[in-house]
Image (cartoon, rainbow, N blue to C red):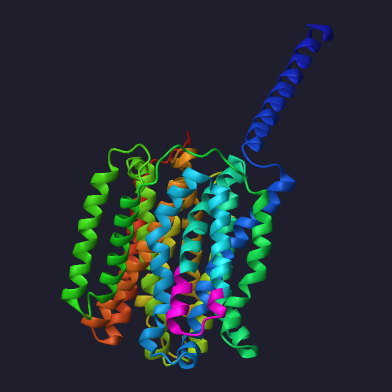
Amino acid sequence: MSTSTLQPDNSSSAASRTAEAREVNDADAVHDADGLPLPRRGLAVAAILGAGVLVVLDGAIANIALPGIAQQLQATPADAVWIITAYQLAVVMFLLPASAVGESFGYRRVFAGGVALFTAASVLCALAPSLPWLVAARCLQGLGSAAVMPLGLALLRFTYPRRLLARSIAWNALAVAAASASGPTLGAFILSAASWPWLFAVNLPIGLLVLVACAALPSPACSVRRIDARSIALNAVMFASFVLGSGRLVARPLYGGALLALSAVCMVLLVRREMPKAAPLVPLDLLRVHSFRISIIASVCCFTGQMASLVALPFYIQHELGQSAATAGLLMTPWPLAVMLAAPLSARLAQRVPGTWLCAAGSACFASGLALCALWPLHGNPAAPIAVFTGLAGLGFGFFQTPNNQNMLLSAPKERSGAAGGAQGTARLAGLTLGSLLMSLMFELLPSHSAVHWGLAMAALAALAGSVASLLRSSARPRAT
């Protein structure tokens, strides 16, 4: 065969490769179009992450100021706890309604409104002359946070192209972990130089900068739906009575049980009211999707394990091992640091490894770290083993969180991204509440020495349940409609 006859075949092969490369580039261009262009995207991401850090940091630094606030406002420690409780209650009561309002009136508008409300409420907190004033202002802060948390996650889906969504969720997880880890330290630093109102006053310049950046956020089309005030009221009473009842179940069983019964009645009435709707307040439509439902269950399990262990570990380190509070903080620091390390790595792996296996392996690693904390016989200097075990737990949690959140978002239609974000936030808060309740029961039923070990063991089992739940999900990548 002559060279002239071979040449057309080589040219044809080169042309074929060129056409394939062009198709790949065109596909990437389509994916990139499914998001904001790069200059605007950076500003939008700054707004989303900045708002998320703002609300997480505020929740983390407020705890450290409770003794000083109680003393200055002449309140008892029990009354001062309402500064924290009021904020948490407002968040859990209005997460799902805020998601629904965002779908109806626009994600950007409601998200920016949440940032504005949170910032204004921070000023009211700083100016509070009495405890009732401060508690009311903290409620307003919680309302703002309820809009920021779920809608920020939804806006990421419209900000980044689909192929980079895992990376965006990882950056969000990293920012939240960094804010949680640095909160107590930053709060202590502020209190060393100024009085407690400055803990809230520092939110003003940050909030204003975030509000300016909100102009770059995407503005997807709104859905046509009517806001049902009765459903919002049922939802608020359901979650409020669940949180309050869970907290009082051990100390006051009858009162706590009555509140939990009220929560169950409200849930039944709410589900019956919302079931026929195409876009219900409680995302029943999304919970019918197998992959979404499994991700929610796994999230509740892992957050239950996280909260139970974060309550048990300080008691374990300080009371049983005889270490100081400062040492306990240092020994638990590898946890958020490991989450920060794992989040971007899991985003890269999510592009190559099915999310099912990544979530299952991450939560199994999380469970292993907690189990080692519960079972490892510590003698002499406990610093090295505890630091390694908490780091292992944080690493596993970080590898679980990013692909699990990505699956939740991509399992939902794009127009229901707000509801998916609200469900994710609700699953997180439900897990944190269950974890606190679990440790309350352990401390009530067992001696302190046994309670921390059994609490850590139960936390490990909850994380392991999250791993098993993740394996029940199809390994196919979810496709959004």
Residue in the foreground of this view, choosing between 208 and 158: 208
Q: Is residue 339 visible in this depiction of the protein?
A: yes
Residue in the foreground of this view, choosing between 389 and 256: 256
Q: Main secondary structure of the magenta part?
A: helix
Q: Horizontal and vertical percent for residue 478?
A: 46, 39
> How many marks overall?
0
**Does 3 sit above or below residue 379?**
above
| Residue at image location 77% in from the left, 16% down from the top | 10
**Does 167 sit above or below residue 36?**
below
Residue 131 forms part of the magenta stretch: yes
**Does 460 sit above or below residue 351?**
below
| Residue at image location 28% in from the left, 60% down from the top | 238
Q: Is residue 394 left or right of residue 172?
A: left
| Residue at image location 25% in from the left, 54% down from the top | 267
Asked where in the image residue 74 lies, by quadrant, the reply is bottom left
User: Magenta residues?
Assistant: 124-139
Q: Is residue 174 visible in this depiction of the protein?
A: no
